[in-house]
Image (cartoon, rainbow, N blue to C red):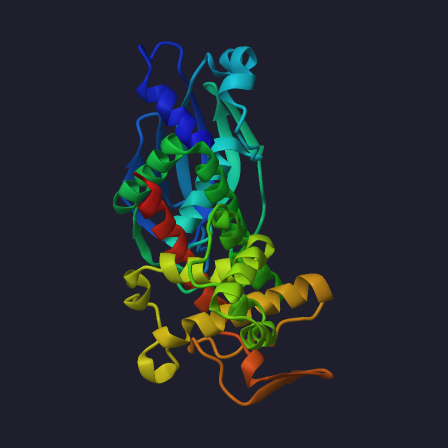
Amino acid sequence: MFLAEHVARWNARKSDEGWRLSEHELASRVDPIGAINLGCVKLHFWSARDMPWGKYDERSAYVSILEDPDAVERWRKNSDEVYEADYYLKGHIPNELAIIMTALTRCHFVYRRSLKSSDTPVMMQFSDASLARGPFDGTQVNLKELQPRLERLLAMASKDRSRASRFMLAARFYHLALPLLDEDVDLAYLFLTSSIEPLLYGYNPKNYGVAEANAELAAVLHQKLDAEGFAQVEAAFLQHAPKVRARFVEFIQEYLPESYWDDPTRPTPGAGQMRREDLAMYLKRIYDARSKLVHEGEPLPPQMRFDSETPHGLAVMAGHKKWDRTEMLPHSRTFERMVHHVLMSYVDRHAG
């Protein structure tokens, strides 16, 4: 993780001599106050256009980075030892910050331009991608309140570099999903499920057996074997069972914090709020729908009402395709909200 390594080098510095300033511009649709200050990296906002919200509603963020003059030479000398586990991300720290800020706030951030590099003006365009619109457009975000969780993310990265790399991949998928939530539900769901999968590395479901994998097989084994024989066959079966869906479902159930259920952006109970006891059922549907999309090319059911977390009706049709009630999914923004809370819970748990 570029940001974590950069901050670690800054904290271990003996002198500020030779560190040069680079400046970059991020864009979003939120109305921020305060600033994030990590010493060598600072983030605050200014309004590039002093116009009312609704007409020119893009806000620019000013990112200043003090660059280590010896970083390139150190990488050349110690690349095999120090940077072996690193990942590549186009746009380096500014783009990483755009992705992290998106994950922290549920608001879409984009790295727009490099303004200055090593004290030299460059004014180089990085991306002209459109900003996603969402329910938080124009809302106020206090950057200072985000800094503690950002620091926990840096602590997680310093503790376990490979875990931080997996988190950044998850955050990148989440970042890709936000612009598609209302435009392309299939891809939005695909990216959101993909944002969970890097975090599943090394995770084993606790409540998984032959019955969960194949109920018919479990019934036959119970008829043919005594308890000891069944346990032996089940243990051998589980050594090679993929358990992918079970890992996905149990991981989200375990990492979904209480703050999700109290999230003020959820609809009221009377407007179709999801019940806790139905969570596993919907997660299984989501993963099954994702698998059919990826492996069979079968589209997801059409999007349901935005103000409801649970689908309505007995069936839905699109063209010649029909989905019954047992296949219908929560709104994509419901699953996005859930993924955000899981990502933040993952950081909090593994910060050390």
Farthest bottom residue?
Answer: 314
Q: Is 20 in front, or is 325?
A: 325
Q: Decide: is 160 above or below 217.
A: above
Dividing the picture into quadrants, the one containing residue 271 is bottom left
Answer above or below: position of 96 versus 251: above
Q: Position of residue 4 (x, y in %)?
A: 40, 30
**Do we see residue 236 in this rendering?**
yes
Residue drawn where x is 67% and y is 71% of the image: 299
User: Image point 41% across, 65% down: which residue?
Assistant: 135
* Residue 39 relative to residue 102: left or right: left
Up/down of 100 relative to 240, above or below: above
Tell me, yes or no, if residue 184 can be seen here.
Answer: no
Query: Residue 314 versus residue 221: which sits nearer the camera?
Result: 221
- Residue 62 in the image, given as x and y percentages of width and height: 40, 36
Whole-percent x and y of residue 345? 34, 52
Q: Nearer the viewer, residue 14 or 164?
A: 164
Residue at 45%, 39% (x, y): give it. Answer: 163
- Residue at image x 59%, y 68%? 288
Q: Quadrant of the C terminus?
A: top left
Q: Is residue 280 above or below residue 91?
A: below
Numbered disc total: 0
Q: Position of residue 239 (x, y in %)?
A: 56, 53
